[in-house]
Image (cartoon, coloured by chain):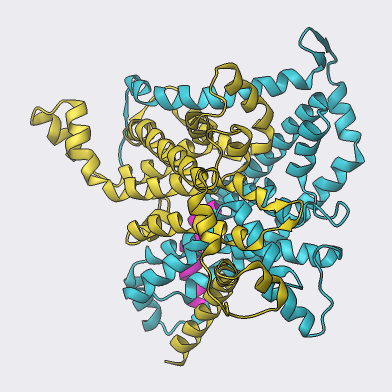
Amino acid sequence: MIIKTENNKAWWLVLPVFLLVAFSAVIPLMTVVNYSVQDIFDQNNAYFVGADWYREVLRDPRLHDSLLRQFIYSFSVLAIEIPLGIGVALMMPTKGRMGSLCLILLAIPLLIPWNVVGTIWQIFGRADIGLFGWALNALGIDYNYASNTGDAWATVLLMDVWHWTSLVALLCYSGLRAIPEAFYQAAEIDRASKWAVFRYIQLPRLKSVLVIGILLRFMDSFMIYTEPFVLTGGGPGNSTTFLSQTLTKMAIGQFDLGPAAAFSLIYFLIVLLVSWLFFTTITYMDKAK
Amino acid sequence: MNMTKRKAFGITLYILFLLVPIYWLVNMSFKTNEEILGSLSLWPSNVTFDNYMVIFTDPTWYSGYINSIIYVSMNVVITLLVALPAAYAFSRYRFVGDKHLFFWLLTNRMAPPAVFLLPFFQLYSSVGLFDTHIAVALAHCLFNVPLAVWILEGFMSGVPREIDETAYIDGYSFPRFFVRIFLPMIRSGIGVTAFFAFMFSWVELLLARTLTSVDAKPIAAIMTRTVGATGVDWGVLAAAGVLTILPGLLVIWFVRNHVAKGFALGRV
């Protein structure tokens, strides 16, 4: 650990970042706050309405539904991707050519534009032209993601697992590489079982990368928009319409600026709150030890 | 031995799961629309390059790729230029509000892009930057700069302070030390950061689409026009999709030796 010295001139080095992020974060955020407390008809006709929009939005059943869907979705994503990612990382070859080849292959889904990910699965899942949909139907399973709610959910989840498990796996892989060989040798001398090695050596050492992985996966899955939009368009009905999509419909589709802005802020606060709770619990548990 | 075999089997299975959908896209991009809709075949019976030719000969198609590459490169350059000094400050000094600043930067990574769509549109329109590459590049800095500072700070903390001090004693000025000695020492960190900045900027569509209309329209947005009145032009859609995967492959090839360390985000 580096000992840091007190020096307020360091602000000069941070200033460009501060200005840049302030320009693209603070000004838009203030605009949103401004909209959320006004009723705007046109440029010269805007009335202050206080917390009315917030009250309206909090009572809106469409929002309750999509918020519930969003939480179920994010938790399912975490419950599948985190264990699977750890498993994949443990199975990866540790060195040599096969190691780098695996790394590159695993990283491919992460580098595909999100709407193309949607397109890939849209094609892949279709019963007439897609291998996946065709194979399922040939096996006698009646599968159609465009009309059956369960199938739509399964496809969206499978797509997310396909797309993002690699991130968790690569994070864990780099965490595993940082464990000194001596730890494993000690375990061998003690005749520790495979499970004991995993539970008492590998898992504790993976904690810091897993915290990052869980946070990133939670935040990104909670904000998901493009992939389900391309794949299912939010349907059938509203069954795969997540929060971002509801919000975009409100702001751009119906041009309800006030409620959309109020909703945006609530949305932002939920993400912040959950991330903060998670982060504080982890640090607290660290201190308790 | 049995264990190693089982591991190899497992990882092969997983990689197959990753590659089959992509293979299907590539397969389709070499077929004619009649073949795609006609019967299901595991490989194209008559390999055709027509779908790719459509993209390479029509400027409204290939300009999309050029636009995307321009704003992504601009974003990577801007991100690195501002994040490098800031990361140095965070790794070497304590200053008023440093912890708060760091956390505030990270909260921007948590803001749903959908929240910023409309205000971004208005902000960039009002300063006359709408439909320019720089607008998208600046907008993407919102989530790339915090991440870059985070990763770089980790790499820089791994360089002992004594190096800085020795350089000052030898009479180096700060800028000269920073460029000539310090940056070369963390070049793998810079490569990894550039990779992440590239990745998140390349895959993002929502902001890029909102901030552009014609002149800087990204390829991902142009792809939607394969859906026409006569149905979807599946072949061209697949070919366009395949072409969006290639730049990513190229970039990961360059950083393949550092990427394992990079995914530790410099912190492990």
Q: Which chain is yellow?
A: B
Q: Chain A colour?
A: cyan
Residues shaded magenta: A196-212
Q: Count how many numbered circles sit on residues in the image.
A: 0
Residue nearest the observer in this picture, B267 or A108: A108
**Image quarter of residue B161:** top left
Expressed as whole percent of the image width and height from the top left, the position of residue B42 reads: 61, 80
Say whether residue A67 is magenta: no
Quarter of the figure that contains the N terminus of chain B: bottom left
**Image quarter of residue A13:** top left
Picture residue at 43% right of the left edge, 22% below the top: B96
Picture residue at 77% right of the left edge, 31% below the top: A251
Quarter of the figure that contains the C terminus of chain B: bottom left
Residue nearest the observer in this picture, A90 or B83: B83
- The chief SS type of the magenta part is helix
Could one spot residue A167 in this view of the protein?
no
Expressed as whole percent of the image width and height from the top left, the position of residue A181 reads: 33, 72
